[in-house]
Image: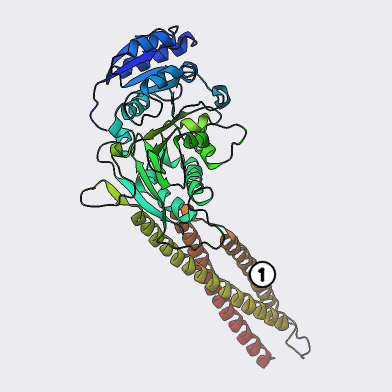
């Protein structure tokens, strides 16, 4: 995180809050004093009083409760409705707020609504520091710890959603950090929404007769992740997109909750959209904090930040790839290649296991066939052989043959049980995420069954030898008689 600087803030308190919420708001203002000179105004002040306060003075941010922020249009007019830098007028809410409560879209070009109810003090400070400095309003670096790598890639018209999901979720900082790993479903939804903005609603949408040239870049994507913040950044160009159109697209709309923009509002902890002045470029940043805010407050309003910026204050240019002068950037494809190699290794092991299963099945079939033949031979011997008159065998030999037949029946039952176990193992379904945990256990189980088959076969050979001895005794007895 960059070194905190001191700014000038004006903060209008919220007169509607109960004592508990007021106490939290006081804690927030005290935390902001560590990065800014803060002037507090009573919650019952009027718009005229606020205008008088800021007139002729340079404040970086003026905070007001969300309902006053939406109603006090003269503050925006004072600073300039079409401004693309400079002082900021921002609204906040420090109580549970639902999207329908804020009403229809306001008439100006920007909306900044900050969530002071769900975010903790550290998370609020991160956002305010980024908001206060023009050079830190765009990109991801201002929201991340210092020297945090940022993974990036260009999206062509052939970009697949599955590749995006696999590449991002395989990043070590995500899969090895429990706070982010447990939010993998939320991350998937937001990645899906970002992908849809390009390939289902935006410039990547395939029209009839349009070619799929991979050279035709459609968007630029970044992922930045540290222990305190995870962010997705998407930059792309549209045919025509004014600041008002950008605000209209992302304004909370309860009547149409399913489009990609509305999903980003619901499942991200904060959403920031910048339209670049004098261009048709758009920058979208979806941010997440370890406190899992969105999962616990899906129906509530989260931090929502839409405004136009001039290109000169964009500190992290879109479509910038890893270079010697940008050591913080990493190519997301490296992560994807690692994942591909892992998938190939898994594929090889899968075929090896399949081959082992097939070999085991063949051996079981052979053993069952051989066992069936031996049982048939035993039955023939008990009746004196095929085509021969029954010769009463010695009692001890008959008892021994009965015992051997019982043993063979037991072996047949054991082999049947082993076959069922192998069938059960073969029918199990494993995905790539389960491979690292389950594959070694599956191979061990197969190896144990294989050893059991070898043991049973060895016992069978011993019994065959015993049968041979019994036949020899029979011949000796018949010669004597």
Position of the C terminus by quadrant: bottom right
What's the coloring here? rainbow
Query: Compared with residue 458, is residue 234 higher up or lower down, i.e. above or below?
Result: above
Q: Is residue 210 left or right of residue 11?
A: right
Query: Compared with residue 143, is residue 401 higher up or lower down, i.e. above or below?
Result: below
What residue occupies the far left of the structure in this picture?
324
Mark 1 residue element: helix
- Residue 317 image point, x, y percent: 31, 44
- Residue 299 image point, x, y percent: 56, 29
Q: Nearer the viewer, residue 209 or 201?
A: 209
What residue occupies the far right of the structure in this picture?
389
In this figure, what is the number of numbered marks? 1
Quadrant of the rendered image containing residue 23: top left
Q: Nearer the viewer, residue 406 or 308?
A: 308
Q: Is residue 111 left or right of residue 415?
A: left
Q: Which residue is mark 1?
A: 409
Q: Nearer the viewer, residue 15 or 474?
A: 15
Quadrant of the rendered image containing residue 335: bottom left
Query: Residue visible at 46% across and 27% down?
Result: 108
Position of the N terminus by quadrant: top left
Quadrant of the rendered image containing residue 312: top left
Query: How busy is the neighbourhood of tag 1: few (under 14 within 10 Å), some, or many (20 plus)?
Result: some
Query: Residue visible at 62% across and 85% down?
Result: 473
- Residue 445 image point, x, y percent: 50, 60
Query: Compared with residue 85, is residue 411 higher up or lower down, i.e. above or below?
Result: below
Query: Residue visible at 46% across and 48% down?
Result: 239
Whether residue 450 is visible to the viewer of this picture, yes or no, is: yes
């Amino acid at each position: 995180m960059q070194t905190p600087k001191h700014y000038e803030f004006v903060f209008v308190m919220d007169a509607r809050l109960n004592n508990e919420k007021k106490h939290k708001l006081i804690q927030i203002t005290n935390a902001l004093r560590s990065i800014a000179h803060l002037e507090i105004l009573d919650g019952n002040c009027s718009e005229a009083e606020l205008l008088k306060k800021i007139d002729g003075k340079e404040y970086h941010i003026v905070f007001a409760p969300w309902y006053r922020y939406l109603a006090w249009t003269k503050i925006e007019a004072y600073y300039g409705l079409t401004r693309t830098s400079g002082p900021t007028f921002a609204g906040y809410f420090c109580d549970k707020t639902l999207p329908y409560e804020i009403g229809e879209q306001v008439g100006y070009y920007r909306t900044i609504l900050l969530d002071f109810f769900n975010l903790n003090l550290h998370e609020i400070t991160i956002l305010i520091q980024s908001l206060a400095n023009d050079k830190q309003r765009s990109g991801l670096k201002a929201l991340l710890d210092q020297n945090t790598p940022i993974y990036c890639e260009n999206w062509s018209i052939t970009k697949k959603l599955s590749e995006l999901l696999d590449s991002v979720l395989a990043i070590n900082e995500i899969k090895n950090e429990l706070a982010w790993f447990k939010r993998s479903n939320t991350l998937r939804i937001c990645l899906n929404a970002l992908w849809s903005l390009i390939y289902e609603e935006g410039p990547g949408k395939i029209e009839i007769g349009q070619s799929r040239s991979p050279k035709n870049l459609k968007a630029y994507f970044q992922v930045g992740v540290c222990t305190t913040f995870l962010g997705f950044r998407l930059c792309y160009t549209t045919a025509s997109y004014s600041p008002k159109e950008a605000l209209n697209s992302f304004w909370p709309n309860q009547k149409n909750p399913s489009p990609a923009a509305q999903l980003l509002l619901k499942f991200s902890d904060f959403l920031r959209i910048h339209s670049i002045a004098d261009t048709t470029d758009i920058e979208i940043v979806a941010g997440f904090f370890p406190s899992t805010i969105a999962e616990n407050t899906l129906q509530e309003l989260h931090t929502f930040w839409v405004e136009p910026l001039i290109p000169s204050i964009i500190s992290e240019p879109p479509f910038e790839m890893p270079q010697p002068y940008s050591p913080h950037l990493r190519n997301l494809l490296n992560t994807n290649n690692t994942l591909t190699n892992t998938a190939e290794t898994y594929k090889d092991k899968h075929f090896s296991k399949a081959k082992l299963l097939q070999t085991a099945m063949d051996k079981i079939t052979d053993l069952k066939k051989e066992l069936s033949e031996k049982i048939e031979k035993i039955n023939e011997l008990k009746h004196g052989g095929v085509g021969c008159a029954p010769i009463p065998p010695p009692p001890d030999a008959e008892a021994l043959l009965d015992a051997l037949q019982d043993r063979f029946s037991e072996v047949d039952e054991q082999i049947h049980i082993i076959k069922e176990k192998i069938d059960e193992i073969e029918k199990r379904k494993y995905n790539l995420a389960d491979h690292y945990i389950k594959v070694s256990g599956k191979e061990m189980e197969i190896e144990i069954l294989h050893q059991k088959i070898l043991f049973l076969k060895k016992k069978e050979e011993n019994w065959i030898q015993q049968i041979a001895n019994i036949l020899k005794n029979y011949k000796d007895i018949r010669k004597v008689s």
